[in-house]
Image: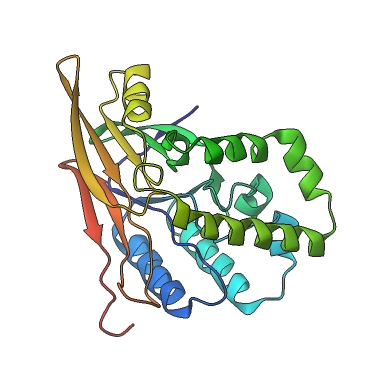
Amino acid sequence: MNKLSLDGTFWLASDIHLGEHIPKTRQAFYAFLASARAHANALVLAGDIFDFWAGDDIALTSSEPWLQEALNQLKQTAAQIPLYLMHGNRDFLIRDTLARQVNATLLADTVMIKSVAGPIRLSHGDEYCTDDPAYQRFRKIVHNRFIQATFLALPRRLRHRIANHIRNKSRNSHQYKNNTMMDVSVAAIEQAFLEDPQVRTLIHGHTHKPGHHTSILNGTTYERWVLPDWEYDQAPVRGGYIEIKKSGVCLHRFELPANA
């Protein structure tokens, strides 16, 4: 588990799901990056930055205009403020090669952040969805280092085909899952807090259910904040971020600038 110390005000966002066919969402996210560069001391993107990721080598040699623009926007941000990337369930194959290309730092799947608002545990969040055992089995398989290395050694076209198949299968499976399976498990969240009782704030994304939750364990109050997902191409339009500053944690909706 990484430890990260961040001074001053920093922003957190996740679940942007950048891809070719969401131009309004991409532009909203780029406006958000510009705002972060102007108002934050650092930015952490906590996974599912991209809708899928079949390998750094494919992305860095791609001629797709939308992807090159996305990487340039990240690089421009990292040139002005520290930029940190985390894995999500869609882009868990991002490696240090991509992070170096955009001058960002790739973090572990769970990070303990020392901040002006106190210690914070940060992760993408899918590991807490333990009421969905089928997904957890799948997650264990695809996070296996040997399986990842085998996949990344495949021809690029085959990797794209497999990634698209998995993505479509995942979307289709959602109709058979109830709300409990699609959300984090209370027991998993409690276990995360009990692993380090001194860290009383947990932040994650993944569930697309932004909000603020409190729980009491052994007489101590703990807070869980959930990052929003981003969608500006279809209704309901949504997107946002969490701001960490000396006064505490704040969840914001991102409003597009008037000239955007």
Q: Nearer the viewer, residue 219 or 5?
A: 219
Does residue 252 appear in the picture of this structure? yes
Coordinates of residue 171 in the picture (x, y in percent): 52, 59
Does residue 107 appear in the picture of this structure? no
Q: Is residue 92 left or right of residue 122?
A: right
For image coordinates 43% across by 71% down, the residue present is 30
Given the current orientation, which residue lies at the most extreme front position? Answer: 176
For image coordinates 60% across by 57% down, the residue present is 169
User: What color scheme is it?
Assistant: rainbow
Residue 231's quadrant in the figure? bottom left
Q: Is residue 94 left or right of residue 232?
A: right
Coordinates of residue 151 in the picture (x, y in percent): 77, 47
In the figure, 62 relative to 94: above or below? below
For image coordinates 54% across by 51% down, the residue present is 104
Residue 106's quadrant in the figure? top right
> How many marks do you count on the picture?
0
Q: Nearer the viewer, residue 47 or 180?
A: 180
Q: Nearer the viewer, residue 229 or 102?
A: 229
In the figure, 22 relative to 33: above or below? below
Given the current orientation, which residue lies at the most extreme bottom position? Answer: 259
Q: Is residue 69 left or right of residue 63?
A: left
In the figure, 180 relative to 167: above or below? above
Quarter holding the C terminus? bottom left
Q: Is residue 21 left or right of residue 10?
A: right
Coordinates of residue 174 in the picture (x, y in percent): 47, 55
For image coordinates 58% across by 76% down, the residue present is 66
